[in-house]
Structures are given as C-alpha cells and as structure tokens.
Image (cartoon, rainbow, N blue to C red):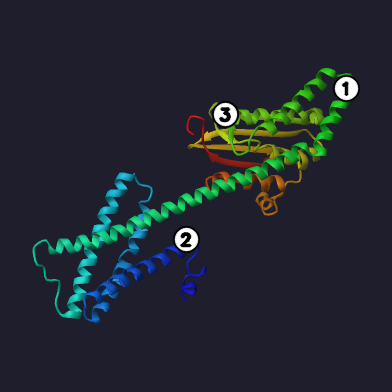
Amino acid sequence: MVNAILSKSWFPGSDRWFWLLQFGGWAGYALVNYIGSLMHEMRDIYGVVLILGAYTGLFLTLPLRYFYQRVWEWHPLLLMIVVILASYTIACLWAVIDNATYWEIYKFGFTPDSKLAYFKNNIAKFYIVLSWSGLYFGIKYYRMLQSEKQKALMASSMAHQAQLKMLRYQLNPHFLFNSLNAISTLILVKDTEIANKMVNRLSHFLRFSLDNDPIKKITLKKEVEALMLYLDIEKVRFDERLEIIVDVSDEAKKALVPSLLFQPLIENAIKYAIAKTEDQGVLSLIAYIEHGELKVRLCDNGPNAPEKPELLMRNAGVGLKNTRERLSALYGDDFSFRMTKNEPQGLCVEIVLPYETLESV
C-alpha cells in the first residue's frame, strides 16, 4: 500500500524519500507517545489526541519544506536565524491547535500551573520542530554530498572513457596514414625542413594527448596550442585549401577547460565539412568571457548543412556525443552545448562553460 502511494507516478525522485520519511517519522512520534501514555494509564481517548497531534505536526511542517527550499542558498548565519524563527512559529501554532484539540475532546483547555507553563509547552513543541528542521537539512546535505560523490565518480569514469575515445581518434590508422603520407610526400619532393616540422608537430601532439589527464583541466591557451598542433598537421594535407581563424581574448586564455575538448569537434568539421568543400575551407575558433561565463564558438563553412542543425544532436556522432556527455559529467547542468547554422554556409558548435581560472580553484 505504501509502495503504491509512493510510486514513481505519484512522487518522482527525491519526493518519494521525503514523503516516506515524513509519514514514517510522524507515525513513529505518535507511536512512541502512545506507548508512553500506556505507562501512565491514560484514558484510551488520549491515543486519539496523540494521533491528532502527530497529524497536526505532519501538516504544519510541510510548509517548512518549501520555505527552506527557497532560503537554501542564504548565508549560513542568516539561514540559521531564519530556521530557528520559522521552527518557533510553527511550534506556537502547533501548541494552539493542540490546546484546541484538548478542549474539543476533554472540554477543557490547557490549564497552566504557572505563567511559564504556556512557554514551556511551546518550547517542547519547538524542540520537536527544530529537530525536524535539523533532520531535514541533515538529510538534504547528506543527499547532496552523495550526489556530488556520484557525480565525481561519473565524471571520472566518463573522462577515462573520453580519453580512450580521444586516443582512438588520435591514433587511428586513418589519421596516422594521412599524417605519415604527407610527411612521405614532403620527403620525396625533398622538402625536408617542412617534413621535419611535421614530424615534430605530430610527436608533440601525440605526447600532449598521452600526458594530459582528461579529468584535470588545462588553460584554454594550452588547449588552443595543442589544437594548432593538430591543425598544422591537417594543413599540410589540405595545403592552401584550409584557413584557420583563431580569436581568443586574453581573459579567455586563462579559463580552464577539459583537455582535448575541441579536437574531436574540429576533426568532425574537417571530415564532414572541409573535406567535402571544393572551395577554400575555413575553420574558426572564437572564445571570450561574458557575464562570468566562457563562451566558445567553433565554426566551419562546409556545404550541405542542414536547415535545423539541432536535429543532429538527436543522432549525434561519436565526437559530438562524447563531448556532450563529458561536459555533462564534469559540469552537471551548468553548461550549454548546441549547434547552429553558420552564415553564409556551414555549422557552428557553441559551448558555454563556467569561467574558472587557476586562481579561482
């Protein structure tokens, strides 16, 4: 019966746990008080009073939950004061309703033995409501910590998976074949200087790929430098057909980003856009800081771009899907990843991340 009431269709997610603890906790409170009343040989009808008292406490604490959700991010000291005042207000209201219940059932209200009797009754109720508030915050903080731990574990797992996928990109036979073939051609035409530069760039890029832990973040400046190593290799392949535009503000260069974040996106652009264009292919990378966020825009001028690029996200390829999943694991909901149409032709990938620097972490 309880499972049916607390089913997913009724109370999704954490709501099920709240209602389970809410009903279970107040039922336990009524049971403990009822057992205590038996020891003092109270009248049977007193059990009804206890049940009504627990019922009142259950419903009076419900508004506290939604109130606490609104003030959750307040300063800790202010939050503590607000919690104490809210708990005492609910306790006073509870005491008034309890007194009315006594009057209706026993035909007498709460008769104080001294002037402090009402205050003591309120304080007793206050301790109960304050305990409820403490449990609420304690459980919520515990669940948040568990969620953060789970997110960290998920981020670690996703990052390692991303690393394996990145290495598959960087070390796949097609990529190495194109690079080595370009170097071989340079050697045949005795352009040894450029061939030597190509070998150096290839070795530096592969070394960067292997040395950088995808869990850790690097500055955007280093990320762009690694990306340029990769693009320099591709430029030899496409010769004059590939133009690269990089516009990164000085402030954005300090931003921390996951290592090798842009490489699979650029590789997708080269494979599906630049390689298919008969004219000069253009790849642009623009990054800047706005409203405390890092905004990055990667664009190409490839032909045959869909009218609604966002539809590509539904059937995203490995590169797009991997990047989006990696960002989700690292940032939760605190990021944006979307595709738009470039003008006059081509596609753009727009990424928005929190602005973090080495000084801020």
Q: Residues within 10 Å of mark 2 (few under 14, many from 20)?
A: few
Q: As displayed, is residue 19 above or below residue 145?
A: below
Q: Residue at x 38, y 69 (%)?
A: 23
Disc 2 from disc 1: Cα separation: 64 Å
> Where's residue 41, x and y in %?
21, 78
- Of the two numbered discs 2 and 1 on the same chain, state the one appearing first in sequence: 2
Q: Residues within 10 Å of mark 1 (few under 14, many from 20)?
A: some
- Of the two numbered discs 3 and 2 on the same chain, state the one appearing first in sequence: 2
Q: Is residue 35 left or right of residue 215?
A: left
Q: Nearer the viewer, residue 122 or 338?
A: 122
- Of the two numbered discs 3 and 1 on the same chain, state the one appearing first in sequence: 1
Q: State whether residue 328 appears in this view.
A: no
Dots 3, 2 in contact, CB < 8 A: no
Q: Which residue is mark 3?
A: 253
Q: Secondary structure at mark 1?
A: helix
Amino acid beneath label 3: Lys
Q: Secondary structure at mark 2?
A: helix
Depth-wise, is mark 3 or mark 2 nearer the camera? 2
**Total marks in image:** 3
Q: Which residue is mark 1?
A: 187
Q: Residue at x 49, y 74 (%)?
A: 4
Q: Which residue is mark 2?
A: 14
Q: Quadrant of residue 257?
A: top right
Q: State whether residue 35 appears in this view.
A: yes
